[in-house]
Each structure stands twice: as structure tokens, then as C-alpha cells.
Image (cartoon, rainbow, N blue to C red):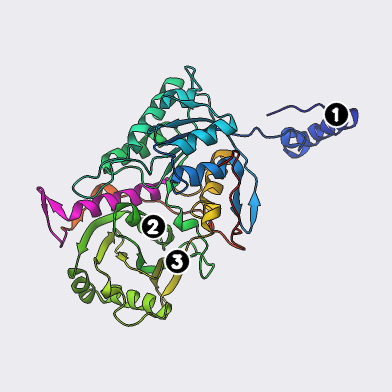
Amino acid sequence: MEFQKLTRRQMLGVAGMAGLASLTGIAADASPLFAQKRPRIACLVTYWGATRSHADWIITKLLDGYWWQGAHTASRVDVVSVYIHQLEESGLGQKICKSKNIPIFQTVGEAVTLGGKELAVDGVVIVAEHGEYPTNLKGQWMLPRWWIYQQVVQVFEQSQRSVPVFNDKHLSISWDEAKWMFDKSRALNFPLTGGSSIPTYFRKPEIELEIDTPVKASIVVGDAADEGALFHCVDVLQAFVERRKGGETGVRSVQCIRGPETWKWTERNPWAARLLESVRTSFNLKPGHFQEISAPNVCIVEYNDGTKAAVYSGRDVTWTYAGEIEGRKDPTIVSMPGWPGPFSQYHASNSQPHWITEMMVTQQEPFNAERLLLSTGIVAYTMESNWENGRYSAIGRRIETPFMNMRYRSTRGAQFSKGERPPNTPYIRGFAE
């Protein structure tokens, strides 16, 4: 806490509050005269060389503020250090850091210790989403998320202290690495969040499922052409289904079917066909619209409590959830329509930096980190499903996932953006273009 110089009248007020505290249990330091310290954040990124990079979308909001619930909100954190893995290719990040007097460190450890020997920041933001990295045979982009994270954890363990960590999108391409990352957050007792920005987009209609909604089956339709796009869809799915009656029970199995077999599976599963048709009609699309896409695929998820779900790669519906809910005649359909703002305002990241900031300020996870882990696992095994012993099959194998037996109950309220969207005006930098 930062101490402010007080007048005699203010001192008497503080003394009065102390007396009141002894009678009521209200903390004397609850006085607004004591300003809360702004969290100091280390940002660790792979690449920051383009305005379309996640690093630029996210970190500029932490620096300059973000658009939330119809208005601009000033930043409540201080970015005090940056690490860039592909530094030479990240000229934009270098220019921004220079204009803001933010040091760029050569290693992850130096960034979180500010060049010292102990942890010296109040929060860590990892954005390892872009850059020149290889893609493996299964189509997984081999971004060094775990590599960065484990170096942060090493500093936590050496310092015997930890701070909140945000990890953009999924934790890793590997379930074992992702589970290690989650387990470390629990063992070292630090809040962990991340995932897709889409669940916090503007919605149409502006609704959230109530806790304990009796969801029987769900689908999400959106761009799921590759691993990164699929994760957005899966995280949207998890954001809805975790609110079902009884809470999350974990994932029993995952399967991926690609090509024309997608529609044969749909015909055999009327629940999925009904929900897909409800999405088509809600957008007034012509019959057979989704069947016309060039590379169809469906990710099939079975939950331990019998709940069914599927993610379809589709077009012209942005990201749309449809759920069959017990006792309701028609499916519940919620869309996250288009980008939440113009590109000039870095549309793809406004509400997410709000929740990053909330975690850094309150030291509380904005949603259960188990959701992030399950979304990561579903995507990892979807990419695995079509491959076995080095051979590809369009009809992917059904992979049982008893290790994804995670139970929790969502406690969060609505977290999506509402109100007016950001204006289409140029984003003002701290330097000349």
C-alpha cells in the first residue's frame, strides 16, 4: 500500500475509522486515502512484429487501456519488462517498448526478476501465439508456450513466491505438458488463466446460461480449419457446457472426422443434425449451406455424465453455440457475431485484457482454470485422432480420455462485452509510424 500525506482533519478521520473498526470489524485500512498499488507485469512473447499479432493486440491494451462495456477503461497495471523470443523479427515491439521506456530482457528469467535474482513482478502475461515456428505432421503449431512457462515456474520455485499467470490460448500441444502447467499452478498456489478471447466477445442475444442449466447436447459452429481456429471453437463450447446441471464432470472421449464422412456421422446422430439445422435457419442460410464447404470436419466430445457435444467447421455464422436444453422446445442459440470492433482499434482483444487485469488486481481467476486445461486436452486429442502409427485416416479413432476426469462447478457470472462497440478511429501510438 502507498502511504499518502494526511492533513490533521484526515488524521482524525482515520483515527475515527480505527475506532469504528474495533466495533464493527471493518478494516481501518479500507480508507480511500490509501491507494492500492498497481500490479507490475512482465510480458513474455514469441513475436511482436505486426499489428495483427496477439502480442500487439493484448499488450497495447495493458499499456494504454481497453474498451469495456461501451467505454474506454484506463490501464490499471504497469508493464515493467518484456521478453521477445524472436526479437530481430519484432521491430514493432521494440519501437513500442522504446517509446514507453520498457526494458526488453534477453531471457525469461531476467524479465520476471528485472535482472535480479528473485521474482520482482506482480504478474506474468505469456503471449506465445505468433512467429516463425514449425508445424508437425498432425497440424499442431509448435509454439514454445510450455518452454516459456516452465522458466517462469523455475523462478517462482527459487523465489518461494508466485504471482498470477495469463497464458494466451491453449496451454500446449501436449496434454502431459498442459497438465504439468495446471498442476504447477495448484502446487505453487498461483491464479492461472488464458484461453480464447471469443467467449468474452459481444453476444447476440446478450445472454449467459444460468448455473445448473439442464443442457443435454451442444454444438459450436465456426471456423475450425486448423488447430488454432479449432481451439477458439472448443473454448466457446466449454464456456457454455461447464454451466450445465451438476457442473463439469470431465471428458470421456474425443474423436475427429474429416471430409464427406462428417455428414454421414451427422445423419447417424439426430441430436447433432437438429442443432446444426437450428443454426442454419437462425441465420436464414439456404438448405445444405454447411455441406457445401470444401473441407468439412467435426470434433466429437463425450462427457462423463453423458452430455454430448460437437464442433463443426462452418462459415457465415462467425462463432455460434446451439444447445438442446431439457424442458425447452427450441434450441438455445447464442452467436459471437463478427469482430467486436474495427481493426483500427485492434478489435480482437479488448474484453480479454479486462479479465487479465482483473486477475492481476484481485489475485483471483476470472474462471476455473480447469476449463482452460480441458479445452487444451480436447484440441490436443482431436489433432491426434486422425493419426495412428504415423498413418492418417479421415475417420479418426475415438480416443478415450480417463485422465481428463476433472470435476468442478462454475462460479463465474457473465463475462462478455456489452454496449457500444469501439469507434473506428486510428489507434494512437507513442511514436511516429
Q: Which mark is residue 19?
A: none
Q: Are marks 2 and 3 in contact (CB under 8 Å)?
A: no
**Disc nearest the viewer among 1 and 3:** 1
- Residue range in magenta is 369-396
Identified at 40% across, 70% down, the residue is 317
Give the residue pinned by disc 2: 238
Give the residue pinned by disc 1: 11
Identified at 49% across, 22% down, the residue is 113
Image quarter where the N terminus lies is top right
Q: Quadrant of residue 324?
A: bottom left
How much space separates mark 1 and mark 2, taking CA atoms?
51 Å
Q: Is residue 297 above or below residue 270?
A: above
Q: Which mark is residue 213?
A: 3
How much space separates mark 1 and mark 3, taking CA atoms?
52 Å
Task: Report how many numbered discs are placed on residues in the image.
Answer: 3
Upstream in the sequence, badge 1 or badge 2? 1
**Disc nearest the viewer among 2 and 3:** 2
Three-letter residue code for mark 1: Met
